[in-house]
Image (cartoon, rainbow, N blue to C red):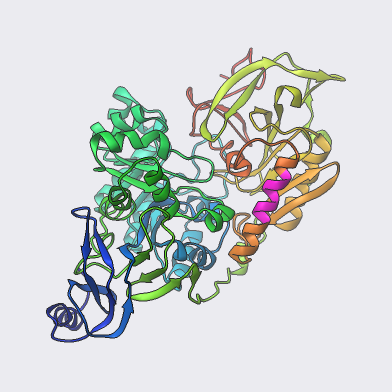
Amino acid sequence: MGGDLTLLQRRLSVARGDEPADVVIRGGRVLSVFTDELLDADVAIAGEHVAGVGQYESGARVVDASGLVLVPGFVDPHMHLESTKLMIDQFARAVLPKGTTTVVLDPHEIANVFGLKGVRELLAEAHHVPLDSFVMVPSCVPASRFETGAATVEASDVASFLEEHAEVLGLAEVMDFPGVVGGHSGPLAKVAETLAAGKHADGHAPGLTGRELNAYLATGIRSDHECTTAEEALEKRRLGMWILMREGSAARNVEALLPVVLDHGPENFALCTDDREPDDLLSEGHMNDAVRKAVSLGCPPAVAVKMATLNSARYHRLPEHGAVAPGYLADVVALPDLEGFQPVHVWKRGRLVASDGVAAEIPRIVAPDWMRGSVHAPEVSPADFRISAIGRVRVIGVEGADLVTRALETEAATRDGEAVADPDRDIVKVAVIERHRGTGRMGLGFVSGFGLRRGALASTIAHDAHNLGVVGVDDADMALAANRLRDIGGGQVVVVDGRVMAELACPIGGLLSDRSAEEVAAEARALQAACRELGVILPAAFMTMSFLALSVLPELRITDRGLVDVLRFELVDLEARSRRP
């Protein structure tokens, strides 16, 4: 455990009671994540670490925690900062008061726009924020050959990045699971370089089972956050996989997967958020919301906390994180109870960083100019969204918050020789426009499940290549929405009847806002309200929309290159009767 000799000697002296602690948190009950017990004990802090848990009276500062429960700071083992649309300082302002003190980031969104240069910038910015932000080097830039990003990360780049940045934990979610199972050298080489560097690899294997699952795990990949059923999670856990149980904004899997924990215990299970909208961060919370959800569904509080702290840290080989215990980092959250999980105080590395829902002052981060102006899509017209009349068409079927879509087929609605949206059948148009290189390439199709009755939604946040996605009923509104994002440098917008109803500008890579967490959350709420006014029935419409272009999630997706049948891993025509060779 870390520290130079002088710091270790000081910590030992405090632990023995020979010297007063820097901080003593007195009178509370400490949750031991090792035994699931509540201990009547003080917490003595020396520097950034816990020196002792027991009876300690003297300290430079003594905090009265009577009536409070002390738990470890929450550790999110898998999330994408870009989904919050917040710069790292504003994200920290939002989550520190919720008890999150450590996050493991997969920055493949920023990497798809700026390559590893963007990841290096994120690492540099994170050093100025009182939040431990660990990074996994992106494995999916691009996610597959069916989409166009602005950058490419090869196996040699992974090796160099791991050598250059010792603090990087490993390889981020290996999304090309068909390529891994098929033995393709591209994704396998990235895994091999990671293991050779003594690091570990995160997984992404929705619905994978049987021999294919065995093949995926045989590479050394050890986790998955894409489980949606208890049966899937149990099969994977039986084979040694870590299940990162997701509770995001669109995908909320805790309820479905928790029975495995209740029946078999919490080993190899951890909670994560993956993708959370900014308004959800402020209103519902972050990891504390995932813990609260688990407890409300019958999970013992100590077990839920363990899955959000010690288990996350152990999976990622972070030996100083995840417990309030001697030698561990002094990441401590003081709670009034183990039901609501609303922190009263939060300490990060021994420093008080939040009290009563408000974060301490955090230095403002300003993104460099080169991260702006990344949206290079050409101006479009309504004619660009027209589809010639055809018979039977493929439709991307969205089913509630499930990120896995269905490949549907139906007769197209037609008018004046064109295939058109049919909101009465909940079928609207979807388009993805390449926005990095100015090619003007566009994929066109249909999607169901949004409930959209009129207007259009558009976003430059579209996993993972982050091209410009549009969902709409009216071609003119779709064109206006796309052009508006082009003008403001990226973000999200809702348009109806030729006017902008709501928008959230994200000029940093077309992904992040440069405004405060409160401002961004308010704009996100306005977007959701506008969506509801247009008939949208999804709880997180833009989050769901962002995954329509993810060409490694079953079953049917759309990119700038067209429709992708993920099960067959090939491009397919919009007309259902034909297949591309």
Q: In this view, does 350 lie above or below 278?
A: below
Which of the 4 image quadrants contains residue 463?
A: top right
Q: Where is residue 220 in the image (x, y as percent from the top left)?
A: 26, 40
Q: Which of 288 and 316 is in front in this view?
A: 288
Q: Where does the C terminus fall, quadrant-wise? A: top right
Tell whether position 384 is magenta. Answer: no
Answer yes or no: is residue 257 visible.
yes
Check the image and name the residue furthest to the right.
Answer: 416
Relative horizontal placement of residue 27, taking residue 370 as reference (left or right)? left
Q: Taking 72 as reference, is 125 left or right? A: right
The structure residue drawn at horizontal position 32% and vertical position 50%, both measured from the top left corner, is 301
- The picture places residue 236, in percent across and down from the top left corner, at 30, 32
Quadrant assignment for the N terminus:
bottom left
Give the prevailing secondary structure in the magenta stretch: helix
Q: Which of 578 and 343 is in front in this view?
A: 343
Residue 24 image point, x, y percent: 27, 78
Position of residue 566 relative to residue 330, above or below, is above
Q: Relative to 222, is 417 above or below?
A: above
Tell me which residue sits at (37%, 35%) in the image: 257
Position of 338 relative to 441 (above/below): below
Left/right placement of residue 43 relative to residue 501 reads left
Give the magenta part as a residue range: 523-530
> How many numbered circles does the render carry?
0
Q: Does 526 appear in magenta?
A: yes
One can see residue 442 in this view: no
